[in-house]
Image: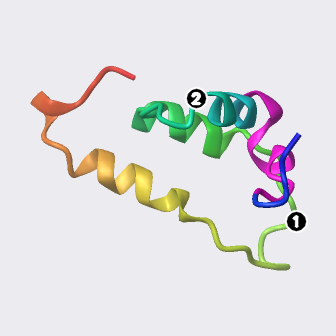
């Protein structure tokens, strides 16, 4: 499914998310939706044996820094 500009993201993000992303690139994802995608993948290696960069760690601090009255329920 992914083209040459998108490496094999279906393995890490899931086919459903990648299909939704490619079908609706203008969609604005809620922090809750992004956290669900980020936490739903399989573990690629045992902790402490390797590392891999991922910028999903910015979602939760961004959500926590949003004032409660501006947060959505998702």
Above or below residue 41? Residue 47 is below
Among the two numbered marks 1 and 2 on one chain, the one whose residue lies closer to the N terminus = 2
- Residue 66 lies, in percent from the top left, at 19, 45
Applied colour scheme: rainbow
Q: Which residues are magenta?
A: 6-16
In the picture, the disc for residue 24 is 2
Please state if 25 lies on the left or on the right of 18 as rendered.
Answer: left
Above or below residue 13? Residue 29 is above
- Residue 2 lies, in percent from the top left, at 84, 46
In this view, the mark in front (1 or 2): 2
Secondary structure of the residue carrying tag 2 is loop
* Nearer-the-camera pick, 42 or 29: 29
- Residue 50 lies, in percent from the top left, at 82, 79
Above or below residue 43? Residue 19 is above
Disc 1 marks which residue?
A: 45
Is residue 28 in the magenta section? no
């Amino acid at each position: 499914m992914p083209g040459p500009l998108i490496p094999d993201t279906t393995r890490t993000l899931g086919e459903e998310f990648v299909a939704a992303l490619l079908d609706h690139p203008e969609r604005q994802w809620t922090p809750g939706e992004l956290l669900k995608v980020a936490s739903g993948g399989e573990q690629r290696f045992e902790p402490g044996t390797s590392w891999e960069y991922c910028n999903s760690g910015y979602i939760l601090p961004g959500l926590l820094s949003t004032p409660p009255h501006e947060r959505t329920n998702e």
